[in-house]
Image: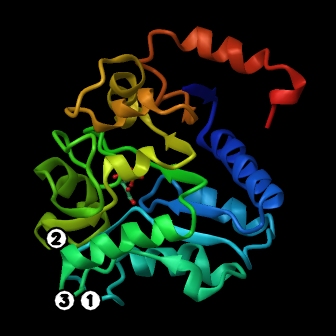
Amino acid sequence: MEIIIRETAASATGIAARIIAKLLRDKPAAVLGLATGSTPLPLYRTLIEMNLDWSQVTTFNLDEYIGLPREHPQTYHSFMWENLFQHINISKDRVHIPDGNAADIPASCADYEARIREVGGIDLQVLGIGTDGHLGFNEPTSSLASRTRIKTLTRQTRVDNARFFGSESEVPHHVITMGIGTIMEARTNLLLAFGENKARAIAEAVEGPITSINPASVLQMHPAVKVCLDEPAASELKRADYYRWVYDNKPAWQTF
Ligand code: F6R
């Protein structure tokens, strides 16, 4: 894991944006995995401002609520079109978001996995982290080998996400999420976390044991993970000084 700690979320976001921009320049037909929530919003704004060419890019989103009408403002479909896709030259038929209204959800999850395989796998997956360590909506105790499927949200995640809805009772209980096994097959994983409320989940994920109680800890087994943090999100890391030293002393050929 490469742990990148910056003073501010804006600075950490800038690094994540440069990593993605480089990928799109090096590989115009890249396959990106995308996340929603508050964490990647500034990243998407930065990518829009960079005026990159998305015409050959394919995307797969991590997750979606089950049962909300597609045009509901809180579906991840609405989120992605509003905050990224409508502002870039991406082709609509290359955008993939799990279908929370599919008649046969298990079959649509299997199709989602097949589609990812057909395009050759995900080059880079953008990830946020839940306060309970979830990745996508893989809640604690999710199988570390899981594939795209239905999950039931924990009370904590519904409380955390109530800020986007009118109240906790409006947050759906059920979701579709890429599995941890799916995420682990991305060639690169780029995890972003900002704010003190993520500090414990990050410390457990980066420096704790690998355990399904903190699903993000499985990233320790992935060969290419970059973790972009602001200082508050890094505040419980025991080896933060080492990570800062590594970043500050990168050989020129390794810088972003
Ligand atoms: C969203 C997703 C979730 C979020 C996580 C953090 O697509 O996959 O795992 O990344 O819940 O959410 P925020 O960024 O709102 O704190």
- Report whether 160 appears left or right of 256: left
Q: Mark 2 or mark 3: which comes first in sequence?
A: 3
The amino acid pointed to by label 2 is Pro
Q: Residue at x 28, y 78 (%)?
A: 108
Read off the residue under disc 3. 103
Point out the frontmost of discs 2 and 3.
3
The numbered dot on residue 94 is none
Front residue (pair 197, 181): 181
- Report whether 59 appears left or right of 253: left
Read off the residue under disc 1. 69
**Residue 239: image x %, image y %?**
51, 10
The numbered dot on residue 172 is 2
Q: Using the image, determine if residue 221 lies above or below residue 24.
A: above
- Report whether 184 appears left or right of 161: right
Q: Using the image, determine if residue 56 lies above or below residue 42.
A: below
The amino acid pointed to by label 3 is Ala
3D distance between C-alphas at marks 3 and 1: 13 Å
